[in-house]
C-alpha cells in the first residue's frame, strides 16, 4: 500500500514538474506586426543598428504593442516605456 502511494506521488510530482517546465522547442517569441509600415520600420532599424537577436525581439515586441491600434498607437514615446 505504501509502495503504491509512493509511486503514485512520485509520478504525480514528475508530471507536475514536467508540465511546469518550459520547453525551448515549443517557444515562439516571434511577434507578428500588424502593418507593413511597422514591419519595414523594424527591418530598417534592425539593419541600421545591427541589433542582436535579443534586442531585435525586444524592439519587435515594442513595435507590436504600438501597432495594435490602442492608446500606444498615438503615444510618441512608446519605445522608451
Image (tube, rainbow, N blue to C red):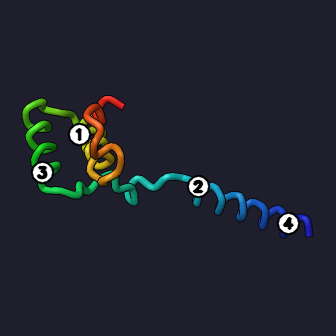
Residue 74 position, x and y percent, is 28, 42
Residue 8 position, x and y percent, is 78, 67
Q: What whole-number distance in Å separates the C-alpha atoms at marks 1 and 4?
A: 50 Å
Disc nearer the start of the sequence (3/4)? 4
Residue 54 seen in render: no
Q: What whole-number distance in Å separates the C-alpha atoms at marks 1 and 2?
A: 27 Å
Residue holding disc 1: 56
Q: What whole-number distance in Å separates the C-alpha atoms at marks 2 and 4?
A: 22 Å
Disc nearer the start of the sequence (1/2)? 2
- Dot 2 falls on a residue whose secondary structure is helix
Q: What whole-number distance in Å separates the C-alpha atoms at marks 3 and 1?
A: 17 Å
Q: How many numbered circles does the render carry?
A: 4
Kindly report which numbered mark, 3 or 1, lies closer to the viewer in this rendering.
3
Residue 45 position, x and y percent, is 12, 36
Q: What whole-number distance in Å separates the C-alpha atoms at marks 3 and 4?
A: 60 Å
The quarter of the rendered structure image containing the N terminus is bottom right
**Taking 54 as reference, is 23 above or below it?**
below
Disc nearer the start of the sequence (3/2)? 2
Kindly report which numbered mark, 3 or 2, lies closer to the viewer in this rendering.
3
Q: Residues within 10 Å of mark 2 (few under 14, many from 20)?
A: few
Identified at 63% across, 55% down, the residue is 17
Residue holding disc 3: 37
Residue 76 position, x and y percent, is 25, 34
Q: Which mark is residue 20?
A: 2
Identified at 18% across, 33% down, the residue is 51
Residue holding disc 4: 5
Kindly report which numbered mark, 1 or 4, lies closer to the viewer in this rendering.
1
Disc nearer the start of the sequence (2/4)? 4
In this orientation, which residue lies closer to the viewer: 42 or 56? 42
Query: Along the horizontal axis of the image, is 30 left or right of 23?
Result: left
Amino acid at each position: 500500500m505504501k509502495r503504491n502511494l509512493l509511486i503514485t506521488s512520485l509520478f504525480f510530482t514528475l508530471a507536475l514538474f514536467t508540465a511546469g517546465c518550459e520547453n525551448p522547442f515549443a517557444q515562439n517569441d516571434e511577434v507578428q506586426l500588424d502593418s507593413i509600415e511597422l514591419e519595414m520600420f523594424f527591418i530598417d532599424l534592425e539593419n541600421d543598428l545591427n541589433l542582436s537577436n535579443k534586442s531585435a525581439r525586444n524592439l519587435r515586441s515594442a513595435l507590436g504593442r504600438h501597432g495594435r491600434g490602442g492608446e500606444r498607437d498615438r503615444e510618441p514615446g512608446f519605445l522608451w516605456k
